[in-house]
Amino acid sequence: MNIHVNGKQLKIGKSLMSYTEDQLVQISNKYMLRPVNANITFTKEKNEYKCEACFHLSSGLTAYCTGSADKIYQCYQKTVIKLEKILRRHKRKIRNHSPSARKKFKLELFN
């Protein structure tokens, strides 16, 4: 998985980069969705930070979410929460629409 962490007119330290990479690896392992690419961009607008995340999966899904807060780690956490929500819903959709799930549902109806 390619992870790109950068900042627009903002210096990103090594600790923030390693923190974001570790979080994204944990999320990808948790949902087992085979991510291909992840882009995280931090910006500072007036007196708050903004984080934009774009997460590409091999299944074709592109999850895009943003978060903003007074502190840079808090804005990243808000973005991660939204990203996890998108991935959780996508995994549930895949699991519920699979042929094996349909067979189980039909068997329960006839019994």
Image: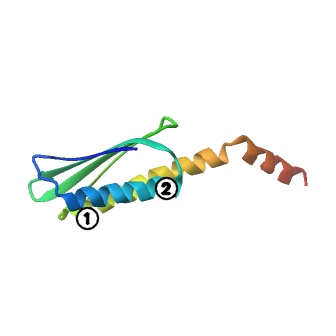
Other-residue count near label 1 (Cα within 10 Å), few / some / many at <14 / 14–19 / ≥20: some
Q: Is residue 16 above or below residue 91?
A: below
Q: Which residue is more in the foreground, 41 or 66?
A: 41
Instruction: Provide residue 6's location: percent of width, then percent of height.
Output: 21, 47
Task: Indicate the amino acid at tag 2.
Answer: Asn
State the image coordinates of residue 46 (x, y, percent, origin top left).
Answer: 8, 54
- Residue at 25% over, 60% down: 75
Residue type, mark 1 in image: Gln
Expressed as whole percent of the image width and height from the top left, the position of residue 52 reads 27, 48
Q: Position of residue 5 (x, y in %)?
A: 25, 48
Q: Residue at x 49, y 55 (%)?
A: 29
Q: Quadrant of residue 48?
A: bottom left
Foreground of the two, 47 or 51: 51
Per the image, label 2 sits on a secondary structure element best described as: helix
Total marks shown come to: 2
Left or right of 91, for residue 103: right
Residue nearer the viewer, 64 or 15: 15
Q: Are marks 1 and 2 in contact (CB under 8 Å)?
A: no
Task: Using the numbered discs, state the Cα–Cα distance from disc 1 to disc 2 in whole angstroms.
Answer: 22 Å
Mark 2 or mark 1, which is nearer the start of the sequence?
2
Q: Which residue is mark 1?
A: 74
Q: Nearer the viewer, mark 1 or mark 2?
A: 2
Which residue is disc 2 drawn over?
29
The N terminus is located in which quarter?
A: top left
Q: Is residue 68 visible?
A: no
